[in-house]
Image: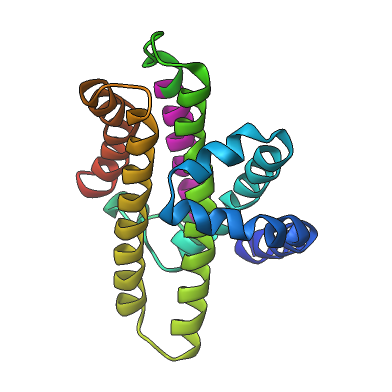
């Protein structure tokens, strides 16, 4: 029941924002091949605002997709009902977002230009939008085609890894435009490896 309600609300929200998504889509795709496009998005208040709104609107669809195809399914979730597992999935992802925000706040070197730092850290929203759209498209197509859950989930994990790799490369390139390689590497460890490592550990260890 909760899943259906959230799915309906997400659909209505995405329809409401469809025009913004269509207008931004070329810029989003450009970020896949050019790191400087992230700077262009960040330098425009209107474009960056639209990007941020779209990213927020994708949170619930992503959580529903992750729940539906059991992308995050540690053993401790097995004892919960459907509503409990969905609520836990959403809560854990929100905690992950909060952890990323905390790392962003605490691990900034003051020598890094604020514009570059913000462009790099906010770029995750761009790739998150594309990531969720791709997951939903692949999940829908493979489900209609009759693919088993394990196959769909495996494809989604490969997509997740590929998209995350592209994001890491582009984010590093943004930092390298104003920072040394060593500082860029430290940012990568503090802003990405730490929070994502904790998330993965919670799925594997617990």
Left/right placement of residue 151 relative to residue 174 reads left
Q: Is residue 60 magenta?
A: no
Locate the C terminus and report the quarter of the image it occupies: top left
How many numbered marks, from 0 up? 0
Residue at (35% x, 64% y) in the render: 159
What segment is highlighted magenta in the picture? 86-103
Residue 116 sits above or below residue 147 on the image: above
Residue at (31% x, 45% y) in the render: 169
Judge whether residue 53 can be spotted in this image: yes
**Of the pair 176 and 194, the residue shown nearer to us:** 176
x and y percent of residue 71 in the render? 37, 61
x and y percent of residue 185 in the render? 23, 28
Residue 55 sits above or below residue 151 on the image: above
x and y percent of residue 69 in the render? 42, 68
Q: Residue furthest bottom?
A: 145
Locate the N terminus and report the quarter of the image it occupies: bottom right
x and y percent of residue 108 in the render? 39, 15
Q: How is the image coloured?
A: rainbow
Left/right placement of residue 61 relative to residue 173 reads right
Judge whether residue 83 can be spotted in this image: no
**Of the pair 2 and 41, the residue shown nearer to us:** 41
**Of the pair 85 and 121, the residue shown nearer to us:** 121
Left/right placement of residue 64 relative to residue 149 reads right
Report the magenta stretch's main SS: helix
**Of the pair 23 and 200, the residue shown nearer to us:** 23
Q: Is residue 101 magenta?
A: yes
Residue 125 sits above or below residue 146 on the image: above
């Amino acid at each position: 029941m909760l899943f259906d309600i959230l799915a309906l609300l997400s659909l209505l929200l995405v329809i409401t924002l469809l025009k913004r998504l269509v207008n931004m889509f070329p810029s989003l795709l450009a970020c896949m091949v050019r790191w400087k496009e992230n700077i262009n998005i960040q330098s425009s208040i209107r474009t960056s605002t639209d990007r941020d709104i779209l990213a927020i609107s994708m949170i619930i669809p992503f959580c529903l997709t992750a729940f539906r195809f059991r992308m995050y399914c540690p053993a401790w979730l097995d004892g919960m009902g459907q509503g409990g597992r969905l609520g836990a999935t959403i809560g854990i992802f929100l905690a992950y977002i909060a952890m990323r925000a905390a790392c962003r706040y605490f691990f900034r070197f003051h020598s890094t230009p604020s514009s570059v730092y913000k462009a790099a850290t906010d770029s995750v929203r761009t790739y998150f939008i594309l990531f969720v759209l791709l997951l939903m498209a692949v999940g829908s197509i493979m489900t209609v085609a009759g693919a088993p859950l394990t196959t769909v989930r495996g494809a989604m994990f490969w997509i997740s890894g590929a998209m995350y790799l592209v994001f890491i490369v582009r984010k590093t390139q943004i930092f390298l435009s104003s920072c040394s390689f060593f500082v860029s590497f430290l940012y990568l460890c503090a802003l990405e490896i730490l929070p994502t490592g904790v998330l993965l550990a919670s799925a594997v260890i617990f």
